[in-house]
Image (cartoon, rainbow, N blue to C red):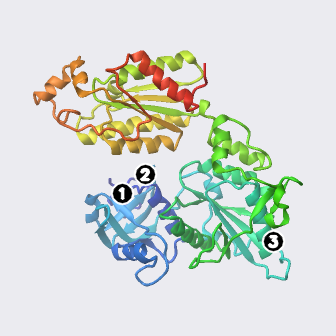
Amino acid sequence: MTAEAGLPDTLRDLPGWAPDAVELADLELLLAGVYRPLTGFLGSFDAAMVIAGGRLADGTPWPVPVTLAVPKELTAHERLVLQDPEGVPLAVLKVTEAWQDPTSQGWRLAGPLEPLRSPAHGPFHSLRRRPDELDPVDGPAAPAEGGRAAGNRLCVATREPLHRKQLGQIRQVAEQLGAQVLVLPLLSGEHDESLVRALLGVRKELPEGTRIVPVPLPPRGDHERDLLLRAHVAAAYGATHLLAEQEMEGTAIPVVVPEPWAYDADVEIWRPVARIEPDHVQAELTAERLGELLDAGEPVPDWFTPPAVAAELARARPPKHSRGVTVFFTGLSGSGKSTVARGLADALVERGGRTVTLLDGDVVRRMLSAGLTFSKADRDLNIRRIGFVAAEITRHGGVAICAPIAPYAATRAEVRRMVSAAGDFILVHVSTPLEECERRDRKGLYAKARAGQIPEFTGISDPYEVPDDADLVLDTSAMAPDEAVGRVLELMVAGGWLRTE
């Protein structure tokens, strides 16, 4: 973990570390001055005070703990080079405290940061700006009706696209405040590109002079703390007001809650509810109904959202019958999962219309995971590698069929999260009893395990954690392989991933 080239000679021998996604976002915002007064990662006392009361140890309001997790072996160093996922050095952490998190028992490092270069990872980086790169107000804000003073900046910090209702509310509030509008797409790693494209697509429907500045800010803690953090980030970018759906005290800048709007079916426009006859209010499209339309490949109605947003929604969430999906089989050695997986792959290829990749346990072991042992750590790494490849196949619209033993619930959950960020995930537990698996033991593995020749063998000397979140359970001692394959196909048809033949 030594820092790579590209550093001054005095820093090249320092250890290097790549933070996780949330910590990397925190690092970028710390370096950009967005998190002022913070100048680095928090120590144990500050973090505890923030969690307990929303304030730093000196009493300064701060909503979320900003900490850096590291392996224990890095806690002995006085300085650490922090890198992005590609190994590019971003900053040097001057360690002032190494501490153990009482909730997770993981190790943390605290201290100020010395910037090395601006982060350059992530989509739409050319749109990103430091707070000091924005003028106090870009251009004069027109005085609002009622004589209010100009010079306000209204911030819309969002993780979701803006539909026609929100666009109307933003225009109304901006006019009332005489404010320039600043839209901060809050990037979290999932569908970031689609979010920014959707916001750029409606720029013409926002007030003139609106700025769109992507900010890396994954969701943090509960909704209340998340809103407090949004307000702090908005204030750092010079906003005087934050548009939000609920009022809250103690925010860095005032929160403005827009008046309710609805679609007037009589005149076919969105406008304030107070101006609509009650029997002309058309019910809004719910998130559930929107998801159903996208899953079925049906068009999103124009009255609800502009075409540019509808196109990005469809791109981010394709119809289920063309969306990438991973079918992940798990079960004991000899349970029949490989046989069913191969049968499913053949059946899908025969149907046509989908790209199918089979990641079977033994084949993966020889190629993707060659050199790994059967220790718990290496078995987990094997499953993570399978999950990574499956997620990439899923991301590009393919069907990945995986058939490892995958005995541990935590690792299966990690793979589910990995794949679900790219598409859909189906977990199939092949629950064939241990006795039947031993009877089928063509390779003699169970006999060797019972004789002590194979340590940590799943089902004998190492546990198999039965899934409680399986989408389908198959016992191949009670059904033929063709029937088991048919059950999976039925599930995929019922779920919309396959069309009915």
| Quarter of the figure with residue 92 | bottom left
Residue 301 appearing in the image: yes
Three-letter code, disc 3: Glu
Mark 3 residue crowding within 10 angstroms, few (<14) / some (14–19) / many (20+): some
| Quarter of the figure with residue 290 | top right
Contact (CB < 8 A) between labels 1 and 2?
yes
| 404 to 164, vertically: above or below | above
Which of discs 3 and 1 lies nearer the camera? The answer is 3
| 247 to 412, vertically: above or below | below
Tell me which label, 3 or 1, sits earlier in the chain.
1
Image quadrant where one finds the C terminus: top right
Label 2, label 3: how many angstroms apart (C-alpha)?
Answer: 46 Å
Q: Residue furthest front?
A: 279
Label 2: which residue? 87
Q: Is residue 190 left or right of residue 202?
A: left
| 187 to 416, vertically: above or below | below
| Quarter of the figure with residue 266 | bottom right
Label 1: which residue? 16
Residue at x 25%, y 58% (from the top left corner): 73
Three-letter code, disc 2: Gly
